[in-house]
Image (tube, rainbow, N blue to C red):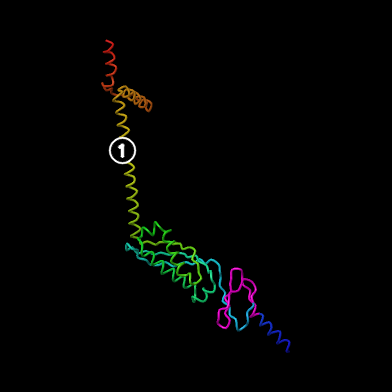
Amino acid sequence: MFYIVAVVLIGLFLASAIRVLKEYERGVIFRLGRLIKTKGPGLIILIPVIDKMVKVSLRLVAMDVPSQDVITRDNVSIKVNAVVYFRVMDPNNATVEVENFLFATSQLAQTTLRSVCGQVELDEILAERDKINTQLQNILDKHTDPWGIKVSTVEVKHIDLPQEMQRAMARQAEAERERRAKVINAEGEYQAANRLADAAEIIQKYPEALQLRYLQTVKEISAESNSTTLFPIPIDLLTPFIKKVQEKG
């Protein structure tokens, strides 16, 4: 009977003393309430009743930041959500300095997102998202550094605009496209006018060019239809020939 009790006690001792930690896990050991060191990964041995262990994962955590109601600097009400990527760099500080580092990081990310987006205008949030992401990452990393946490990336995922603002932006985009179309059309007219002016100067120097252009036009018209076309001939086209006849006479 004594041997059975001894075997049971030894089994209970080993079961409570032996721990196996995975490659990405670390064990923060407290002995009689005092932090002694961090162990792992692999097989570790604890003193039953005396030692307590808190497991901390060192893997990268992707935390979703819920949508936050934000009023931008230009008084536009929007909803913004984001995702934060971070990992524990110091298991001791992540356990001792903050009660629950996951909850604390989530709350800090929400308040920081509202604060940063409320200091800029809507156009800046939409057009310069990389700048907003960098600013959020710097602020979060600065505040979580005492907790032994490294914030590597912050990404603004979605910006929910009111329906009125969406319609206003659609009208603005349509007006911008119309403006560009008018500018391009005016630029084309300007270039065409310059070319016509250059052509008029050439024809003025060489009147025979007008006659060649006239003959080319007649050829193009006759090639498009089999019907008979009456085309009036300006007297000015015959002026060069009349001058030559008069010079010979």
Looking at this rendering, what residue extends furthest in the bottom direction? 1
Q: Quadrant of the N terminus?
A: bottom right
Residue visible at 56% across and 72% down in the picture: 56
Residue 195 lies, with reference to residue 84, above or below; the image says above
Image coords of residue 35 (percent x, y) = 56, 79
Q: Nearer the viewer, residue 8 or 86?
A: 86
- The image quadrant of residue 112 is bottom left
How far across and down, in percent of the image, does residue 212 sit?
Answer: 34, 23
Q: Which residues are magenta?
A: 15-44
Q: Residue furthest front?
A: 36
Kindly identify the residue that appears in the image at 32 percent across and 40 percent down: 187
Q: Nearer the viewer, residue 110 or 216?
A: 110
What amino acid is found at the position of numbered circle 1 in the picture? Tyr
Residue tagged by mark 1? Answer: 190
Q: Main secondary structure of the magenta part?
A: strand
Structural crowding at the residue carrying mark 1, measured as other residues with C-alpha within 10 Å and reported as few (<14), some (14–19) or many (≥20):
few
**Image quadrant assignment for residue 57:** bottom right
Q: Position of residue 138 (x, y in %)?
A: 44, 64
Nearest the viewer among 236 and 51 is 51
Quarter of image, res 185:
top left
Question: Taking 81 as reference, is 29 above or below it?
Answer: below
Determine whether, in the image, residue 230 is placed left or right of residue 64. left
Total numbered labels placed on residues in the image: 1
Badge 1 element: helix
Residue 18 on the magenta segment:
yes
Q: Is residue 121 magenta?
A: no
The x and y percentages for residue 10 are 69, 83
The quadrant the C terminus occupies is top left
Left or right: 126 as drawn, with respect to 9: left
